[in-house]
Image: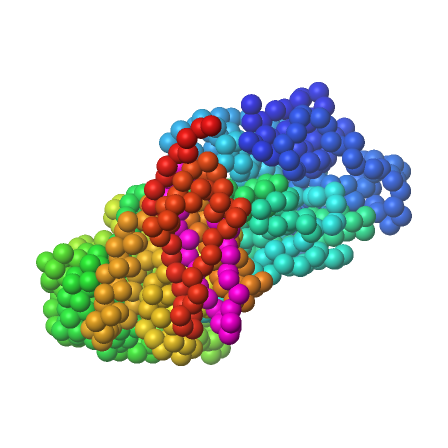
Amino acid sequence: MAIIYQKESGLFTLQTRTGTYQMKADSHGVLLHTYYGAKTDESDYSYLIMPADRGYSGQPGDLGNERTYSLDFYPQEYSVHGSGDYRITGIKAGFQGQVPVLDLRYYDSRITKGKYRLEGLPSMFADGSEDGVSTLEVILKDRYEEFYVHLFYGVYEEEDVITRAVTVENRTGRTVELKRVMSACVDFMEGDLELIHFFGKHTLERQMERRPLTHGITEISSRRGTSSHHHNPFVILGKPDTTEDRGECWGAALLYSGNFQAQTEVDQIHQTRLTMGISDEEFCWKLADGECFTTPEVCMIYTDEGFTGLSHRFHKAFFHRLIRSPWKNRMRPILVNNWEATYFDFNREKLMGLARQAEELGLDMMVLDDGWFGKRDSDNSGLGDWWVNEKKLGCSMKELAEQVNEMGLSFGLWFEPEMVSEDSDLYREHPDFALRIPGREPVRSRNQLVLDFSRKEVREYVERQMFQVLDEANIIYVKWDMNRSIENVCSAAYPDGSQGEILHRYVLGLYEMTEHLLERYPDLLLEGCSGGGGRFDAGMLYYAPQIWCSDNTDAVERLKIQYGTSFAYPMSSVSAHVSVCPNHQNSRVTPFKTRGICAMQGAFGYELDLSRLNVEDKEEIRKQVKIYKENFQVIQTGDYYRLTSPWENRDVTVWSYVAEDRSRAILSAVYTDLHANPAPVRVHWKGLEADAVYEVEGREYTGAALMYGGYLLPVPGCNYDSCMPVSYTHLTLPTT
């Protein structure tokens, strides 16, 4: 049984395939956190908590002078502000105009088969079957008021996943101000841990950084209105000796696409606390009597099999239990996007020329990017006016899609629904639809403002425009973009005292709109995007099976971006395109073959003027299309291995995919530095069947030989050269 409750002792033990999570309601009703790590029995690990008089650590009021008991150092399941715990807390709340304080104690619990549900928020699901998934709900209540906190735990036994979410319920008869509500709080009774997180900037997202945790608070967060290019809502805590292949680590991913906060604190006795949830910066939610507030979900995974074991568990969990799209098990269309081919300068003739080239080269789809709507010939105008500019196109969108379809290609379209240009019909008619502070010049970014998606009438206005276009034409793919951070957060529809709710209401509005879009067009392939990778998070994966990984289209820089992305997110969710050289962003010249190998890490496509390619490059496209289609299933569902780190090996970056049944493997290598008189480069494949024979480039090897002896990469012939050997056959060795 995945959830065991020992009522006499108040002990809850959550068991997954290889991990154990434990908490205990003690004799005072305080819910203590006692263990999270390798799978063990149902022993009560509260014996590891050492009572002591630690001086300036206060005691709960009902304990009198019991000075050895203090929440200032006791490990807790959900810490609260005002309880004598001076560390970072799970929740901070109080009545309007009064000092925020809570004293939460164990009240009740429920164990049910299947997974709890979160209204209006993305969450992992039971995949149509309740087997192997169970829910624990623990209810805490304030000692003085009818104020309840419901802690939800979803236990996916086989996937080694524990999910967390919190619902706050107000029955006090008064309005409560929520100033901080974290989705998860986990206490580790040790301080010798390291933090792995993924920082960056626009065009250089999810750069891995690993550092020891020191005493005090470390914070990874976004206050930009989105999960952001700069920090990702995914962190890992690991032991100092943890490597790719071995060692303990704990991963936590927030299923949320707005402002977030992940904090760690190493305390006075070398314990470590991790909290994760909505950022408390500018957050203040007024919870009226009878109302509830629900946090986003956190997905937590433990393993002692190193970062590779952690990644494999996240990849499988997200692929099978989070992504809902019917496209997740289909061959994704290999597309050409017109953006870097034409930018805003296009007409029907140019688009049809691009489509003809795509058809000749074996591609599946043409995508029309920015510039097809309103007065949109630059990024200074038109956003918000989602009516087809037929004068520019020379036809209707329906006619354009039909012409593309007649060539044997499907058709896709770009939108940026959350933005508005001041030079637009929408803004001139409804300036109050934009987020801005009255009486002040707005903060502009990319010459645009942000629509107030916290308001239903704004969402409905944009929906009507989008649906009119999508109803008219045969469009099977939508790229949903969002090209700025949010600032000047003030909604014209809410009173001043409620502006601390707007950013979260905005995200809820975004989720509602994408849900409406997919309900209306259930077979639509939705691709997420936010200036590339500015909203690459598990929350968006619930709606979009693939996300544009980065606006950086340079193959060499993408090696580090895609490397960092792979720690949590399945590579099938990574949209990547072959771009022109010299690259439009950094002027680097990279061989066409290498650009293709880098882009084939995930959802594959092209973003360049196909008509300007030479014969050799066009033939290379045909080869790449053939290779990708032959190996799509392995790339889509296989195990992904980081064979080298671009941070540690500056000469070559190597990765591989291995089919679930180990019948096929694909290795990719890109040389990032060259040397005279080079030494041979040997790489070790991973995940193969040791007692099997694999044919690689016309030669047979045992799986053991490739993994333990290694494989010699060919000598590079030019700067940024690459190779992609594929093992095509799987032959079982005769037994001896």
Q: Position of residue 108 (x, y in %)?
A: 62, 28
Foreground residue, 170 or 273?
273
Q: Is residue 416 above or below residue 118?
A: below
Q: Is residue 456 visible?
A: no
- As for residue 669 lying within the magenta part, the answer is yes
Residue located 50% across and 51% down the image: 710
Q: Position of residue 716 (x, y in %)?
A: 43, 67
Predominant SS of the magenta segment = loop
Residue located 46% across and 42% down the image: 703
Residue located 79% across and 31% down the image: 47
Q: Which residues are magenta?
A: 661-688
Residue located 89% across and 42% down the image: 53
- As for residue 138 lying within the magenta part, the answer is no
- Image quadrant in which the N terminus is located: top right
Asked whether, in this view, residue 519 is left or right of residue 671, the answer is left
Asked whether, in this view, residue 160 is left or right of residue 701, the answer is right
Foreground residue, 534 or 645?
645
Q: Is residue 112 visible?
A: yes
